[in-house]
C-alpha cells in the first residue's frame, strides 16, 4: 500500500518543492528526478500487483475526511475568487451551487459515513497508473525544455514556470489519487483537483483567449462536478451507512441501486472527457503550451473521464441509460472525426481526434459487454501513447518552424527527418493496421455486432473509421512529400526532449508488439474479474499482425537499395521547365511558384455546422437520459 | 485455420489470372467500341516492357512506398485466400492503399497530389461498404474467417442482397472503372494526367500494375464469398459481375468526386444498413 | 525476348501544328485504324512514354516544353516527327517565330512526311520507330558509357 500512497503523495511533495525553488537548473533537475522516481514506482506497482487481483486497503477515514472537506472548500473559494475577479458569472453561479451541495453533504450526510477500504488497486488501476506514471512524467520532462523555448519565443507571457510545474505535478498526483481511490468522496476530491489544475494550466499565458478558454473548461467541468456531487448526495440518501461509497461495493450492489449514481458520474465523465456537447473546452485548451495539451489529451484529465465510465460500465451495461451514454460517445466519434477533416491546424486535428477516440471509448464502455470493455481499455492505452507522441512532435515542430499548420509541415521529412519519422509512426499508430488503435477498433466492431443495438455502432464505426483514414493520411502525405528545397533545421533540440520523443516512439511500436502480453496479464484478468468472461484476439490473427509489423519494420531497409542508381527528374509540370523549388515561368514570362494544399471539405465537414449538429444531437440524448434518471429517482 | 498453400498459390497465380482478366477486359472493351483490340496477353507485354524501361523517379523514396504497396496488397490477398479473418484482410488492404497514396504524396508533384487526394476520397467512399459487407457475412455465417464463410452451406447472397448491390457499387470504384476512375485511369489521358501514378515509371509503374492485378483477383474472390454455397453459381456470378462492370465502364462518363462519395455512401448507408437491420431483426426474432 | 516492341506507349504533343496532323494522329486511335491492336496506348504522361509523337514546327512558346517533355521520358525513347511541319517547318518554315523542324530542339528518330500525314503513314512511322526503340534498348544494356543513346539516328 505504501507505494500507492507514495505515488499520490510524492508528486505532491515534488510539486510543492517546485513551487518553492526558483533557480532554473535546480528545478530542471528536480523535475527529471521526480519524473524518474514516479515512473519507476508506477512500474513497480505493475510487478507487485499484476497477479494479485483487486486489493483493498483500509485507510483511516475520519482523519482524512476533514482534510478533504477543507481542501474542497478551499478549491471552491479559490475558483470563486478568480470567477469574481474575471467577472465570469456562470462560473461563479456553478461554483456556488457546488459549494452549496458540498455544505449540504457535509452537514447532513457525512455524519454516519465510514467507508473503510479507501484505497485499492486492480489491473485497471495499474494500467492507468502506468499511463500516468510513464507518459505523464515523460511529458513533464519534455516540458522542461519546451517551456524554456516557449518563454524565449513568447516574451509577452509572464514567466510563471514555478506555478506551471507545481500544477503539472499536482495534476499527476491527483490522477494517481483518482485511480487508486475506492472511496467516491475521495475520487470526487481528486476529480475537482484535476479540474482546477487544468483550469490554471489552460489559462497559463493569461492572454484574453487563454483566460476565456480556461473558464470555458472550468464551467463545463463544474457541470460535471455538480453531477458528481449529486451522485454523492443521492448515495448518502439511499445508504446512510456509507458502504456504497466504496466503488467496488457500489458496483456489486447491482444496477437497481447503482444506476443513478453511475449515470450521474458518467455524465461527469462525459464533461471531463470532452464529448459533445462539451467538446469545445478541449479544443479551446490548445491555447495552452503544448505539453499541457499533451498532458490533457493523453494521460490525464480526459482519461480520468473515460476511466470512471469504464469503471462503471458493468452498471451501465444493458441499461437504457447506458445505451444513451454510448450513443453520445458514438455520435461524438463520428462527428468529431468529420470535423477533424476540415482542420489544418495540427493541434486542432489532434484535439478532434482525441474527442473522437474518447467518444469511441465511451461508446464501448456504455454498452459495456466484456469484449467492449476489453476494447475500451486497449483504446485508452494506445491512444495515450500515440497521442502524447504526436502532441510533443507538433510542439517540437512548432518551436522550430514557428507554425503548427499542417500545410506548413510540407516536406518535414526533409527539414526535420527524425521528428517527421516519429510523427509518421505516431500517426500510423492512430489508424493503421497493425498498430494499436486499429486493433481496438477491430475488436470493437466484432463486439458491437453481438451487443444490443450494436448495429448502430457498427455503422458508426464503419463510416467513422474510414473518415479517420482520410484526415490522418493527408497529414502523413504532407509531411513525407519530398520538397527538394527544404533545409534541415533539426539541430540543437535539447537531449531530454529527444529522450522523451524516442521513449514515446518506441513505446508506440513496443506496445503493438507486446499487446497480447498486456492483454493477458492485465486486461483479461480485469475483464474476467468483473464479468466472469473474457476475450482476446485469435492466435492466428496475432501472429499475422506481428508478421505485418515486422514487415513494416524491414520495408524501410529497401530504401538503402533504392538510394543510389536511379535517375532523378523533377515532377511533371505539364511540360513547363521547373526549378527545384518548383518555380516556373507562367504565361507572359511571369515566374510563379507552385504550391498545393490538401482538401478540407469545408462545405461538408465545416466545424461550426457539425458542431451544431453534434451539440443538438448529444444534448437531446442527455435530456432523454436526464428524464429517464428522474423517472428512476422519483 | 490458415492455409499456407493457398497463400502461396495466390501469390504465384493471382498475377497470372489478374493479367489475363485485364487482357480479356481490354479485348471486350475494344469490341464494345467496335475495335479489334490488343492481343489477349497485352497486359503482360505492357508490364514486361515496363520492367525493361528505366525507372525514373522524383525521389528514391517513392520506390519504397510502391514496394510496400505491392507487398501488402499481396499479403492481404494471401490472407484472404488462405482463409484469414475478413476484417484483418480489409485493414491490411487499406494499409496497402495508404502506401500507394503516400508514394504519390512523396513526389510532391501537383498531378500526383491531386491523384492522392482523390484516391483517399475513394478509400473513404468504399471502405464503409466493404466493412459492412464483412459484418453482414458474419451475421449470416457467424464467423469472420474466410475459410468458415467459404465452407458455410448457407446461401449468403439470399440474406445479403442489399449488401451485394452496395458491394457492386464500390467494386466499380475499386476496379478503377468509369464513372469512378477519379484518381487514375487505365485509358487515355485525363484531366489529372495519370493521377497517383503520374510520377511512376518503369519498374515502379510495373509494380503498381501487378498490385492492381492482385487486387482485382482479391475483389473477385470477395464476390465468390456471396455465392460460396455453390462454386458453379459463384463462378458464373463473378463472370456476370465483371461483364457488367465492363459494360458500365464503357457506358458512363467520369463523375465528380463529390458525386462518387455521395452515391457510394448513400448506397452503403441505405441498402447496406437496411439489409443489416433486417438481418438483425430476424436473428432477434428467430433467437 | 524483348517486349519493347509489343507495348509502345506514345505521347502526342502539338508543337504549333495547324491541327491537321493532330486530327490524323487521333484518327489512328479510332476504330477504323485502332492502333491498340499493336499495344499502342496514348498516355499523355512523359514518364509513361516510349514514343514521343510531335506535330508542328515548334515556336518560341513551346520549344522549352518540347525539350522538357523529351527530358522527362525515361530511356529508351524515340521521337517521331509527324507531318512536314514537324520535319522541316513546312509552310510555316519562314515564319518569324518558327524553329523549323523538331530536330532543331531534340533528336528525332523517325520522320513521317505529309501535309497532313495520313494515318497509314503515321502508323507506319510508329512501327518503324519500334525497330529503333528495340535497338536503343539493346544499346542500353551494353556496358554503359560507350554509347550515347539519346543521339538517335536519322532515316
Ligand atoms: S504538316 Fe500540314 S497538316 Fe500537318 S501541321 Fe503542318 S500544315 Fe498542318
Image: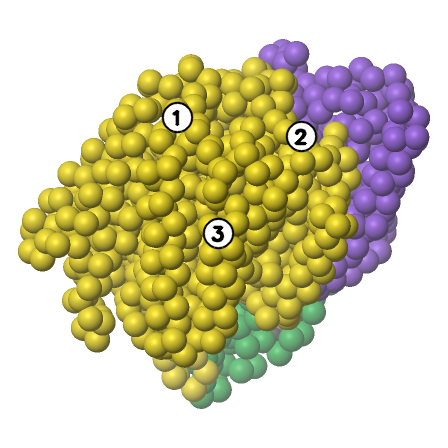
Residue occupied by mark 2: A254
Q: What's the chain of the residue with tag 3?
A: A
Work out whether residue A472 or residue B196 is closer to the camera in this orientation and state it.
A472
Q: Earlier in the sequence, mark 2 or mark 3?
A: 3
Comparing labels 2 and 1, the label whose residue is closer to the camera = 1
Q: Earlier in the sequence, mark 1 or mark 3?
A: 1
Residue depicted at 89% across the width and 24% down the height? B287
Dividing the image into four equal quarters, which quarter contains ligand 1? Answer: bottom right
Question: Taking A396 as reference, is A444 left or right?
Answer: right
Work out whether residue C95 or residue A289 is closer to the camera in this orientation and state it.
A289
Residue occupied by mark 3: A107
Q: Identify the colour scheme used.
A: by chain
* Mark 3 residue CB less than 8 A from any atom of ligand 1: no
Give the CA distance from mark 1 to mark 3. 24 Å
Element marked by disc 1: loop
Q: Which mark is residue A554?
A: none
Work out whether residue A206 or residue A513 is closer to the camera in this orientation and state it.
A206
Comparing labels 2 and 3, the label whose residue is closer to the camera = 3
Provide the letter of the chain coloured purple. Answer: B
Q: Is residue A134 above or below residue A160?
A: above
Chain C representation colour: green
Provide the letter of the chain coloured yellow. Answer: A
Give the CA distance from mark 2 to mark 3. 28 Å
Q: Is residue C94 above or below residue A21?
A: below
Task: From the top left corner, tell me how far across and down residue A25 is, in percent.
Answer: 7, 51
Q: Quadrant of residue A137?
A: top left
Task: From the top left corner, tell me how far across and down residue B202 is, in percent.
Answer: 48, 42
Amino acid at each position: 500500500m505504501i507505494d500507492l500512497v507514495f505515488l499520490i503523495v510524492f508528486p505532491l511533495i515534488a510539486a510543492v518543492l517546485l513551487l518553492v525553488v526558483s533557480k532554473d537548473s535546480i528545478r530542471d533537475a528536480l523535475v527529471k528526478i521526480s519524473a524518474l522516481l514516479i515512473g519507476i514506482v508506477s512500474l513497480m506497482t505493475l510487478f507487485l500487483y499484476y497477479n494479485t487481483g483487486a486489493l483493498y486497503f483500509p485507510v483511516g477515514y475520519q482523519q482524512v475526511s476533514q482534510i478533504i472537506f477543507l481542501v474542497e472548500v478551499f478549491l471552491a473559494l479559490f475558483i470563486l475568487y478568480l470567477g469574481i475577479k474575471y467577472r465570469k458569472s456562470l462560473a461563479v453561479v456553478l461554483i456556488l451551487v457546488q459549494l452549496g451541495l458540498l455544505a449540504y453533504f457535509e452537514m447532513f450526510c457525512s455524519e454516519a459515513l465510514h467507508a473503510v477500504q479507501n484505497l485499492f488497486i486492480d489491473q485497471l488501476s495499474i494500467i492507468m497508473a502506468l499511463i500516468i506514471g510513464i507518459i505523464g512524467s515523460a511529458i513533464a520532462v519534455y516540458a522542461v525544455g519546451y517551456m524554456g523555448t516557449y518563454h524565449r519565443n513568447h516574451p509577452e507571457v509572464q514567466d510563471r514556470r514555478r506555478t506551471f510545474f507545481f500544477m503539472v505535478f499536482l495534476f499527476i498526483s491527483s490522477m494517481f489519487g483518482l485511480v487508486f481511490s475506492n472511496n467516491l468522496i475521495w475520487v470526487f476530491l481528486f476529480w475537482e483537483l484535476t479540474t482546477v489544475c487544468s483550469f490554471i494550466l489552460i489559462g497559463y499565458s493569461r492572454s484574453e483567449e487563454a483566460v476565456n478558454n480556461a473558464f470555458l473548461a472550468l464551467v463545463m467541468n463544474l457541470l460535471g462536478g455538480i453531477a458528481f456531487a449529486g451522485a454523492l448526495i443521492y448515495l448518502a440518501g439511499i445508504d446512510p451507512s456509507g458502504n456504497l461509497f466504496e466503488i467496488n461495493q457500489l458496483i456489486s450492489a447491482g444496477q437497481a441501486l447503482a444506476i443513478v449514481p453511475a449515470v450521474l458520474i458518467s455524465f461527469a465523465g462525459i464533461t471531463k472527457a470532452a464529448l459533445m456537447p462539451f467538446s469545445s473546452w478541449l479544443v479551446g485548451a490548445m491555447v495552452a503550451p503544448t505539453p499541457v495539451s499533451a498532458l490533457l489529451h493523453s494521460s490525464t484529465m480526459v482519461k480520468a473521464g473515460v476511466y470512471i465510465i469504464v469503471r462503471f460500465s458493468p452498471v451501465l451495461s444493458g441499461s437504457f441509460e447506458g445505451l444513451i451514454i454510448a450513443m453520445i460517445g458514438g455520435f461524438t466519434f463520428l462527428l468529431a472525426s468529420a470535423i477533424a477533416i476540415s482542420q489544418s491546424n495540427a493541434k486542432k486535428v489532434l484535439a478532434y481526434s482525441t474527442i473522437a477516440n474518447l467518444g469511441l471509448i465511451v461508446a464501448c464502455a456504455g454498452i459495456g459487454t466484456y469484449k467492449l470493455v476489453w476494447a475500451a481499455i486497449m483504446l485508452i492505452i494506445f491512444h495515450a501513447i500515440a497521442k502524447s507522441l504526436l502532441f510533443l512532435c507538433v510542439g517540437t515542430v512548432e518551436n522550430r518552424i514557428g507554425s503548427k499548420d499542417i500545410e506548413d509541415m510540407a516536406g518535414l521529412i526533409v527539414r526535420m527527418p527524425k521528428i517527421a519519422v516519429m510523427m509518421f509512426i505516431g500517426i500510423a499508430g492512430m489508424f493503421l493496421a497493425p498498430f494499436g488503435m486499429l486493433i481496438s477498433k477491430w475488436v470493437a466492431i466484432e463486439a458491437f455486432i453481438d451487443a444490443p443495438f450494436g448495429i448502430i455502432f457498427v455503422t458508426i464505426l464503419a463510416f467513422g473509421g474510414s473518415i479517420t483514414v482520410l484526415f490522418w493520411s493527408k497529414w502523413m502525405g504532407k509531411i513525407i512529400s519530398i520538397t527538394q528545397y527544404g533545409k534541415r533545421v533539426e539541430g540543437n533540440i535539447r537531449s531530454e526532449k529527444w529522450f522523451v520523443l524516442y521513449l514515446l516512439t518506441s513505446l508506440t511500436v513496443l506496445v503493438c508488439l507486446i499487446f497480447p502480453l498486456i492483454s493477458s496479464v492485465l486486461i483479461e484478468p480485469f475483464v474476467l474479474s468483473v464479468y466472469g468472461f473474457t476475450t482476446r484476439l485469435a492466435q492466428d490473427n496475432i501472429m499475422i499482425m506481428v508478421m505485418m509489423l515486422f514487415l513494416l519494420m524491414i520495408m524501410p531497409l529497401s530504401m538503402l537499395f533504392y538510394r543510389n542508381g536511379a535517375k532523378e527528374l523533377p515532377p511533371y509540370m505539364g511540360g513547363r521547365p521547373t526549378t527545384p523549388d518548383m518555380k516556373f515561368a507562367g504565361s507572359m514570362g511571369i515566374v510563379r511558384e507552385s504550391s498545393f494544399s490538401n482538401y478540407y471539405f469545408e462545405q461538408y465537414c465545416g466545424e461550426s455546422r457539425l458542431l451544431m449538429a453534434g451539440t443538438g444531437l448529444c444534448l437531446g440524448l442527455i435530456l432523454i437520459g436526464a428524464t429517464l434518471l428522474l423517472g428512476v429517482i422519483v | 485455420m490458415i492455409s499456407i498453400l493457398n497463400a502461396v498459390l495466390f501469390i504465384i497465380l493471382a498475377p497470372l489470372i489478374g493479367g489475363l482478366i485485364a487482357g480479356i477486359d481490354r479485348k471486350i472493351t475494344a469490341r464494345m467500341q467496335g475495335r479489334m483490340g490488343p492481343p489477349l496477353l497485352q497486359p503482360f507485354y505492357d508490364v514486361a516492357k515496363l520492367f525493361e524501361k528505366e525507372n525514373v523517379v522524383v525521389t528514391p523514396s517513392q520506390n519504397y512506398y510502391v514496394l510496400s504497396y505491392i507487398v501488402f496488397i499481396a499479403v492481404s490477398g494471401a490472407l484472404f485466400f488462405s482463409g484469414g479473418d475478413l476484417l484483418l484482410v480489409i485493414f491490411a488492404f487499406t494499409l496497402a492503399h495508404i502506401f500507394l497514396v503516400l508514394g504519390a504524396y512523396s513526389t510532391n508533384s501537383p498531378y500526383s497530389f491531386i491523384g492522392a487526394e482523390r484516391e483517399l476520397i475513394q478509400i473513404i467512399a468504399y471502405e464503409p461498404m466493404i466493412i459492412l459487407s464483412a459484418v453482414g457475412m458474419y451475421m449470416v455465417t457467424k464467423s469472420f474467417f474466410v475459410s468458415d464463410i467459404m465452407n458455410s452451406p448457407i446461401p449468403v447472397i439470399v440474406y445479403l442482397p442489399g449488401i451485394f448491390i452496395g458491394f457492386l457499387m464500390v467494386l466499380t470504384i475499386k476496379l478503377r472503372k468509369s464513372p469512378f476512375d477519379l484518381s487514375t485511369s487505365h485509358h487515355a489521358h485525363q484531366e489529372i494526367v495519370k493521377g497517383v501514378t503520374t510520377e511512376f515509371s518503369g519498374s515502379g509503374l510495373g509494380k503498381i500494375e501487378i498490385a492492381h492485378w492482385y487486387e482485382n483477383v482479391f475483389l473477385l474472390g470477395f464476390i465468390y464469398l456471396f455465392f460460396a454455397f455453390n462454386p458453379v453459381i459463384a463462378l458464373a456470378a463473378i463472370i456476370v459481375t465483371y461483364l457488367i462492370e465492363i459494360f458500365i465502364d464503357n457506358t458512363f462518363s467520369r463523375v465528380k468526386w463529390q458525386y462518387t462519395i455521395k452515391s457510394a455512401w448513400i448506397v452503403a448507408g441505405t441498402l447496406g444498413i437496411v439489409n443489416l437491420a433486417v438481418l438483425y431483426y430476424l436473428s432477434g426474432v428467430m433467437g | 525476348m524483348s517486349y519493347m516492341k509489343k507495348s509502345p506507349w506514345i505521347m502526342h504533343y502539338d508543337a504549333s501544328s495547324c491541327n491537321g496532323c493532330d486530327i490524323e494522329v487521333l484518327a489512328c486511335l479510332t476504330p477504323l485504324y485502332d492502333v491498340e491492336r499493336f499495344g499502342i496506348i496514348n498516355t499523355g504522361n512523359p514518364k509513361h512514354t516510349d514514343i514521343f509523337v510531335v506535330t508542328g514546327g515548334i515556336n518560341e512558346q513551346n520549344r522549352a516544353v518540347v525539350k522538357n517533355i523529351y527530358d522527362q521520358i525515361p530511356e529508351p525513347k524515340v521521337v517521331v516527327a509527324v507531318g512536314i511541319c514537324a520535319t522541316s517547318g513546312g509552310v510555316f518554315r519562314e515564319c518569324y517565330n518558327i524553329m523549323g523542324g523538331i530536330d532543331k530542339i531534340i533528336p528525332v528518330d523517325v520522320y513521317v512526311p505529309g501535309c497532313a500525314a495520313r494515318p497509314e503513314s503515321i502508323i507506319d512511322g510508329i512501327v518503324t520507330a519500334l525497330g529503333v526503340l528495340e535497338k536503343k534498348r539493346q544499346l542500353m544494356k551494353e556496358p554503359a558509357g560507350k554509347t550515347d543513346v539519346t543521339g538517335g539516328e536519322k532515316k
